[in-house]
């Protein structure tokens, strides 16, 4: 329902989001996703769609895969994968092997150690080439209790520049518990 601009004559108080997993809307045009086990939360644009079907399909190969959210227009997206009892190097190798199994050619850039949410994070620039063209982004392997969580952000090559600021917001908004 489109409303004309101006004060709303009947303001309705926003219900405060209750506890628990799932997306909760945010004021800044972002939605916050929380891991059902409470280990990590991160924002993504509320225009992006969560693809539960993709998650179910990929869980056959990567059991810790929990989130796939992307922009229907630009195809930019964020993915979250947990790797229990693994260090960042092994988790990265597991992801690269998965991409190869899926028929994509992964090319990695210079890996760097950075801080995300105050945690040691292995960041690896990534280009995935496949039949549909190239996808460019970064895999971020964040050390958490009991393993690593990978937060990957990527978009098709032609959308790289317009996606960069959104990706920066997502990574800056990550919160780790425990």
Image: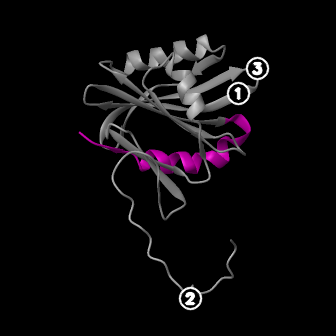
Expressed as whole percent of the image width and height from the top left, the position of residue 29 reads 55, 60
Tell me which segment is drawn in magenta: 156-178
Expressed as whole percent of the image width and height from the top left, the position of residue 60 reads 51, 17
Mark linked to residue 131: 3
Closer to the camera, 81 or 90?
Answer: 81
**Residue drawn at (60%, 12%), measured in percent from left and top?**
100
Camera-near label (1 vs 2) is: 2
Instruction: Compute the Cα span from label 1 to label 3.
Output: 8 Å
Mark 2 nearby-residue class (10 Å; few <14, some 14–19, many ≥20): few
Q: Give the SS element for disc 3.
A: loop
Q: Earlier in the sequence, mark 1 or mark 2?
A: 2
Horizontally, residue 77 falls left or right of residue 147, namely right
Camera-near label (1 vs 3) is: 3
Mark linked to residue 45: none
112 inside magenta stretch: no
Against 27, residue 113 (above or below) is above
Q: Which residue is mark 1?
A: 134
Camera-near label (3 vs 2) is: 2
Mark 1 nearby-residue class (10 Å; few <14, some 14–19, many ≥20): some
Q: Earlier in the sequence, mark 3 or mark 2?
A: 2
Q: Which residue is mark 2?
A: 9
Closer to the camera, 76 or 32?
Answer: 32
Against 156, residue 21 (above or below) is below
Q: Main secondary structure of the magenta part?
A: helix
């Amino acid at each position: 329902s489109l409303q004309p601009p101006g004060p709303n004559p009947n303001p309705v108080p926003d219900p405060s989001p209750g506890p628990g997993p799932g997306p909760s809307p945010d004021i800044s045009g972002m939605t916050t996703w929380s891991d059902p086990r409470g280990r990590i939360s991160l924002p993504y644009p509320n225009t992006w769609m969560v693809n539960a079907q993709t998650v179910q399909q990929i869980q056959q190969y990567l059991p810790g895969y929990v989130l796939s959210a992307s922009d229907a227009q630009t195809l930019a997206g964020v993915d979250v994968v947990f790797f229990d009892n693994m260090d960042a190097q092994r988790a990265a190798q597991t992801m690269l092997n998965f991409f190869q199994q899926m028929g994509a050619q992964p090319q990695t850039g210079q890996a760097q150690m950075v801080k995300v949410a105050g945690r040691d994070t292995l960041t690896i620039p990534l280009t995935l080439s496949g039949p549909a063209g190239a996808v460019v982004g970064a895999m971020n392997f964040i050390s958490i209790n009991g393993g690593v969580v990978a937060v990957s952000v990527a978009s098709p090559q032609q959308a790289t520049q317009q996606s960069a600021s959104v990706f920066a917001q997502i990574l800056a908004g990550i919160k780790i518990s425990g």
